[in-house]
Amino acid sequence: MRSIFLLFFSILSLFAKPIVSVSIPPQAFFVEKIAKDKLEINIIVPPNTDEHNVDFKPEIMAKLEKSDIYFTTGLEFEKIMLDKFKSLFKNLEIVDLTRGVKIIQERHSHEHSHHENEPHIWLDPILVKTQAQTIADALSAKYPQEKVFFEANLEEFQKELDSLNAEILELLKDKKGKKFIVYHPSWTYFALRYNLVQIPVEIEGKEPKIKDLKALIEKAKKEAVKTIFVQKGFPQNAAKTLAKEIGAKVLEIDHLSRNWDKELLKSAQILSEN
């Protein structure tokens, strides 16, 4: 009986899909666009959470260990954990999706000149074209038998990204210089691409102090900002206080959605209407 079970599981393993890991749900969307259903995709940061404070669940780490590739995107937890992952998971290939992307350095403090790399490169469709190429190259090298399949899907995805970019440009064509307030400053690349100005509520990953909130209220009144955007998984108290003080409405957007293209377009539509 034991030998039958072993044979059964051996046969199952032959048909199991290879596993690759990504840090966040939008990356899973990108990989799936190129690999379709040929791979199992393990996501380190679940939806509706803060990608800067990660709880490493055992089942996710178990799948990371079994992964052939881990696609990173420059988040803080990656910098802390990558050396550990490399030492623990000897067969794991790590592919950096910031490769070939011009990274913005942000000053996250009003009081100090400390700069950090801005990691939210997945919110600009044109930068995603570069990331998609890196994904396709890595998958083709790892699974050469599927190279033609991956390249055909990449070409189709690149066209979709160009179309999405054109659609967002059309929506925001009359909004050049528009200022918008967002709790977590994740829209830097999006704002740069579409000539918008992002005003963050959060300071250095924390809710603003009273003096910072007062300064933000004055700035919002001066700029006549009427909409404040909040992201799922982040605190909303400061945004709600700010909204009450300036008579603005609070709207939720999701920068970590796995339905990446639809959510990005929805965010652009909200910005065009408010």
Image: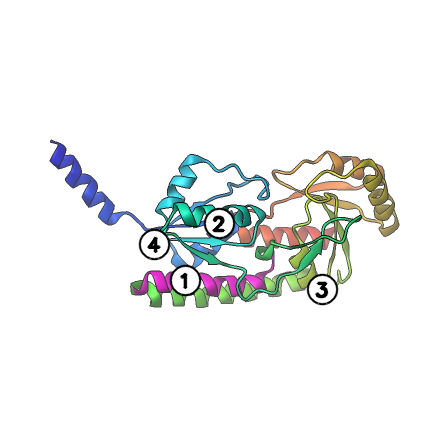
Q: Is residue 232 magenta?
A: no
- Earlier residue among tags 1 and 4: 4
Res. 154 image quadrant: bottom left
Question: Mark 1 — residue?
Answer: 138
Q: Amino acid at mark 3?
A: Lys
- The disc at residue 173 is 3
- Earlier residue among tags 4 and 2: 4
Quarter of the picture holding the N terminus: top left
Q: Amino acid at mark 2?
A: Leu
Looking at the rendered image, the disc whose residue lies closer to the viewer, 3 or 4, is: 4
- The disc at residue 82 is 2
Looking at the rendered image, the disc whose residue lies closer to the viewer, 1 or 3, is: 1
Pointer 3 local density, CA inside 10 Å: few below 14, some 14–19, many at least 20: few
Which colour assignment does the render follow? rainbow
Q: Does residue 184 appear left or right of residue 45 in this picture?
A: right
- Earlier residue among tags 1 and 3: 1
Looking at the rendered image, the disc whose residue lies closer to the viewer, 2 or 1, is: 2
